[in-house]
Amino acid sequence: MITRDRQRALKRKKRIDTIKTVIVTMMAVMFAIVFLTPIVLTITNSFMSPSEISANYGSIFATTEKGGKVFVSKTVNLKLIPDMITFSQYFTVLLKSPEYLFKFWNSILYVLPIVIVQLGIATLASYGFARYDGRLKRAIFFLYIIVMLMPYQVTLVPNFLVSRSLGIYGTRWSILLPGFFSPFAVYLLTKFMKRIPTEVMEAASIDGADEWMIFSRICMPLCKGGLASIAILVFFDYWNMVEQPLILLPDSDLHPLSVFLSKINTGEISLAFAVAVIYLVPPLLIFLYGEDYLVEGISYQGGIKG
């Protein structure tokens, strides 16, 4: 039988747990509002008229006669709901100014091949690293880790020199080739495959399965979550790239939309919001579609579910 002191302790613990839940929920809501506000403002402001955007944000983009920035003396008006909804910015971006769509398709032409080829190379390399052991393998994998830990800014000059020596400087291949052989996917997928029990592979080998059957029928099905999460991370990484195109592509016609967004002049402030929304659509759709795969790939990490 539960004593009164025990009942009081349980009630006190329940109140404390309720208070903790309320505090955590409020903090989560607060952080969600802080992080989502810029996205919501971008989407809503993309439906504002150019005159309304200039009236609200013109002081931020104002410049002096010599091209320098001026001090923002007045408070910027952050408006969540436009006075009059208009689609003129989207009409201009999608129909009147094809250069924006060209930059968008440039981003697609860079990111999709990099994601597909990098995953293809990573699956084969990761299987070799996870399946076999040896000093040479450990040394090569250690080099992969060193290269992956280096900031991309450190390798820009070597990439520039290699691109010039190969004759691909200023072409799409100067972006694609380094992306194909990036060590990021190899490292993550190797760690993922190493969590697959060796007993499963040994049992398949005893039953007569060759290496290709073990790779294609055992490792790949168990690594679906990891492949999906890595594909999403690689897509986000290269969709937002800026330094590589600026250094390796002197021709601005080959620049992706991520670079072009920063070059929209002050006379096209209203278009910047519309272009930013269009730029957000593919990552947002991929995240919403692959959220479960991303969470599963990070939490599951190659083990066999019971």
Image (cartoon, helix red, strand yellow):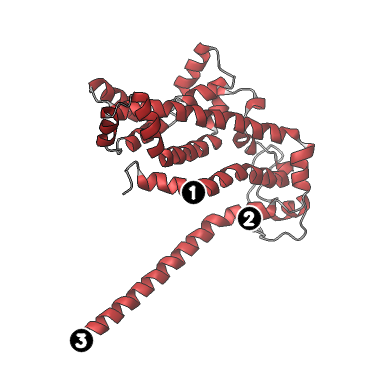
* Whether residue 25 is situated above or below residue 256 in the rendered picture: below
Q: Nearer the viewer, mark 1 or mark 2?
A: 1
Question: The N terminus is located in which quarter?
Answer: bottom left
What kind of element bears circle 3?
loop
Name the N-terminal-most of marks 1 and 2: 2
Q: For mark 1, what is the residue? A: 291
Residue in view at x 61 percent, y 33 percent: 108
**Callout 3, which amino acid?**
Thr
Q: For mark 3, what is the residue? A: 3
Residue 43 got which mark?
A: none
Q: For mark 2, what is the residue? A: 41
**In-front residue for pair 177/200:** 200
Q: CA distance from mark 3 to mark 2?
A: 56 Å
State how many labels appear. Answer: 3
Residue in view at x 46 percent, y 30 percent: 119
* Whether residue 113 is situated above or below residue 230 in the rendered picture: above
Q: In the image, is 245 to the left or to the right of 299?
A: right
**In-front residue for pair 158/72:** 158
Do tag 1 and tag 3 residues touch (Cβ < 8 Å)? no
Give the percent coordinates (x, y) of residue 297. 40, 44
Q: CA distance from mark 1 to mark 2?
A: 24 Å
Residue in view at x 23 percent, y 22 percent: 135
